[in-house]
Amino acid sequence: MRPGSDTSERERVLNTWYRRRLKEEITPLIAKWEKVIGVKVAQWGVKQMKTKWGTCNIEARRIWLNLELIKKPVHCLEYIIVHEMIHLLERHHNDRFIGYMNSFMPLWQYYREELNRAPPGNIKGNNIPHKRRGITCINNPVRLHSTLQYVSPLVFEQANELKMC
């Protein structure tokens, strides 16, 4: 990040980084669940959404996932991927859909509740500043793709630079 860059530039750089990390996690999860569920996703993408965690275009077999999922535990991302892929088998949230969810991911209701505690329109609340080692930081939980462990990189501004600690 260049010294003197403004807040919007810092946000753009951070969102680009988040998008890259999320895409790294999505690819193997879709491949895994295509085999398990027996469906094929033709296309998928990541975008910022205000009210949804994901969407599925059944005719195009395309799934869109909310960029903010990078700030959630990997099991929540996996739940949304499975949920959207189940729509390729059943369009509506009916008994058949619920049966598929129960069959493929028995804890899906727990993951849904976890996500709904901070719905997409409320996501900015996840970036609550706090003090750590005397530095004001913003805690954005992110996962390390290679180990799928949870880490919390602390993003902070110091001397007009975006830094990770």
Image (cartoon, rainbow, N blue to C red):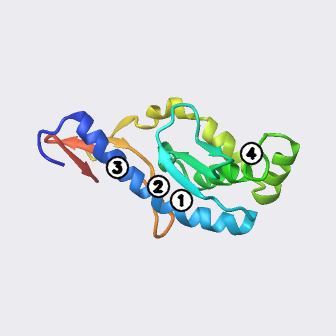
Q: Earlier in the sequence, mark 1 or mark 4?
A: 1
Q: Amino acid at mark 2?
A: Leu
State the residue position of label 2.
22
Per the image, the residue denoted by label 3 is: 16
Q: Is residue 47 left or right of residue 80?
A: left
Residue nearest the viewer, comparing 29 with 59: 59
Asked if residue 150 lies left or right of residue 159, the reply is: right
Q: Residue at x 81, y 47 (%)?
A: 97
Q: Earlier in the sequence, mark 4 or mark 2?
A: 2
Q: Which residue is mark 1?
A: 26
Q: Earlier in the sequence, mark 3 or mark 4?
A: 3
Q: Residues within 10 Å of mark 4 (few under 14, many from 20)?
A: some
- Amino acid type at circle 1 is Ile
Q: Is 102 displayed left or right of 48 in the figure?
A: right
Picture coordinates of residue 91 (x, y %)?
A: 77, 43
**Label 4 sits on what residue type?**
Gln
Circle nearer the viewer, 4 or 2? 2
Q: CA distance from mark 3 to mark 1?
A: 15 Å
Q: Are marks 3 and 2 in contact (CB under 8 Å)?
A: no
Could you say which disc has been placed on residue 109 in the image?
A: 4
Asked whether the residues under the numbered discs 3 and 1 touch, taking CB atoms below 8 Å apart as contact, a structural biologist would say no
Q: Residue at x 44, y 53 (%)?
A: 142
The crowd level at tag 1 (other Cα within 10 Å; few <14, some 14-19, many 20+) is many
* Distance between mark 3 and mark 4 Cα atoms: 30 Å
Name the mark on residue 151.
none
Which residue is found at the position 68% from the left and 43% from the top?
A: 112
Q: Position of residue 87 (x, y in %)?
A: 73, 48
